[in-house]
Amino acid sequence: MWAEKCVRNEVGKRRVRRRDFRIRFFVLGVFAAVFFFTFLTQSFKKLDEEVGAASLANFDPGYIMSDYQMGNYNSMSEAEIQAFLTAKNSCPNTNYDAYLQLSANTRYKWHWKDGHFVCLSEELFGDGEVIGSGDTAAHIIWQAAQDYRINPQVLLVLLQKETGLITDTIPNDGDYRKATGYGCPDTAPCSSQYYGFKNQIRKAAALFRTVLDGGWTNYPLGENYVQYNPDPGCGGSVVNIRSLATSALYRYTPYQPNAGALAAGYGTAYCGAYGNRNFYLYFEDWFGGIKDETVRYVALNTPRYMEVKETTNRIDPRNGEIVDEIAGGRILKFMTKTTLKDGRSCLRTEFGTKNKEDICIPFEYLKNVELKPDEDFESGKKIIKAGAKKVFIRAEEVIATYEKQLIREIAAKIEFNGKTYYITEFDCGSLEYGFEEADVEDVPEYQNLDDVKMMTLKQDSDRIDPITGGYYSALSKGNVYKFASMIVVDGLEYYRTEHNTVNNIEAAVLGDDLVEVNFVDFSEPRYMRLKNQTERINPATGEVVDVLQKGRVIKFTTKILINDRWYYRTEHNTLNNLCMVIDAEDVEEIEQ
């Protein structure tokens, strides 16, 4: 119907045009039957031509709407949307003869119920194109507004300027399936994948949100050439687009009104385009107009914690309207402030500042908090024990229990009601949530051994971070390593190699998997001969490693005493830190 959609493909940007529902482009050669049907339909419709429309004297093509107004998703409740729809159109058409005549055209369907045409304010919509059961239009509009954080007034105006559904007393299923004109280019049929009232509303809201969030738009902030009409021959001009909301409207309807269209009010003009003009007019007439809602915040000299004196309202500084309530006793960190129209200071929280929320609390509702962080506390990592309880401190109320042990950066410590609480980095934006001292313990540190220990693995073992359980690598039994530090976690000893100690790598082996081996160097290397076939063993476990044949001459460099019996280790195994030895009784000296 009347829509354009701008997309990007592999070769660049392709513009598809949108038409307003009040534009009527008639093509030569239209079938007489279609013309007659259109004439018959329009004779039964009341198009709600606006009388005494708002002035276009202040229309600015570069600032059609503020970002705040497009994103003010709490401007109307669901009940208020329903009341608006009913006030604009209470479905007054009771002409049954008209219904019978229109129903003769099987291409479209009209909904007749309880002696009247059912219009938008009374219709129910299911998924897809289901009409007559499901959700009300008011609910669908409100839900889309909440889900995509788009002003429901924007969606109501969009419906009117695209298809006139707000005031149409005899809409049909064809009108609903293309309610907002989404996916309906002038140069091709509407895409059926976007059919359906609910689908149309949500797709439109999602598009507006994408642009408001900084997503792609074919008309970015700054100077853009914008045509006056889908026909390039009608010309255009360079427009300095100064709000993302305006950019979103141009992405949806990529034309600006020319001088003739502006002079015509809701009427038509040569080479005119009316989508964005009519959007402006309907918003002026229905909701009080487009406003520059810029609010300027300044940073506090020093961010501060303050307590809400009693249950009070958070307000929108643009218009002073109440956004929500905030409970008394809450302690929040404030970063910025603004001045309200009546001269009062209004403070914005750290969270609101970081997320650029235009919500603040008047200063008179706040007081300096008595509960302050320990100024001498040094932040750092601590262990939150398994079973620890996260507490809403002011009410001493448990809000969560942690099943697993965690390590968290602790940013603050406070005293309240005789108890000490630790507050994580995540929660330090307010002094509300913390862990009791009993549920927090220091992260243990490695202690250097007095002397490096030579130890071997009794079995294959994993090197892990003993604090977090993080895995590093697997070690095979039989090798000898130098261990230089150890740590105790949950009563278990873990040892760290000399290399990992020097490089501060948090990888250690469970002490129960190690056995100390104290090799002694020979005064000088010795060549010795095997007197008989000999088993080579692991002295830590007694396991046989391999068998050596009688008569071999081998160079030995280290030895170890086990149970008052000496065992020799070859030069090769010494150099490679392998824990393999031969019983000294199985070798003999070689005559030099």
Image: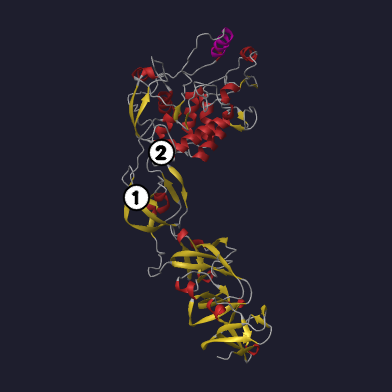
Please state, as top left, top right, bottom left or bottom right, where the C terminus lies in the image: bottom right
User: Separation of disc 2 and disc 1 at Cα?
Assistant: 18 Å
Q: Specify the segment rendered in magenta.
A: 32-42
Q: Nearer the viewer, residue 292 or 241?
A: 241
Image position, residue 149 (x, y; %): 48, 40
Disc 1 residue type?
Lys
Principal secondary structure, stretch drawn in magenta: helix
Image position, residue 418 (x, y; %): 48, 71
Q: SS class of the residue under badge 1?
A: strand
Q: Nearer the viewer, residue 108 or 229?
A: 229
Q: In the rendered view, would you say 55 is above or below 552?
A: above
Label 1 packing within 10 angstroms: few (<14), some (14-19), many (20+): many
Image position, residue 88 (x, y; %): 51, 25
Provide the residue designation for mark 2: 68
Rendered image quadrant of residue 228 = top left
Residue drawn at point x = 44 percent, y = 67 percent: 380
Disc 2 residue type?
Tyr
Q: Along the horizontal axis of the image, is 298 left or right of 104? A: left
Residue drawn at point x = 56 percent, y = 34 percent: 140
The answer to whether residue 264 shows anywhere in this view is: no
Q: Along the horizontal axis of the image, is 441 left or right of 584? A: left
Q: Nearer the viewer, residue 488 or 442?
A: 488
Q: Are marks 2 and 1 in contact (CB under 8 Å)?
A: no
Residue drawn at point x = 68 percent, y = 86 percent: 532
Q: Nearer the viewer, residue 550 or 265?
A: 550
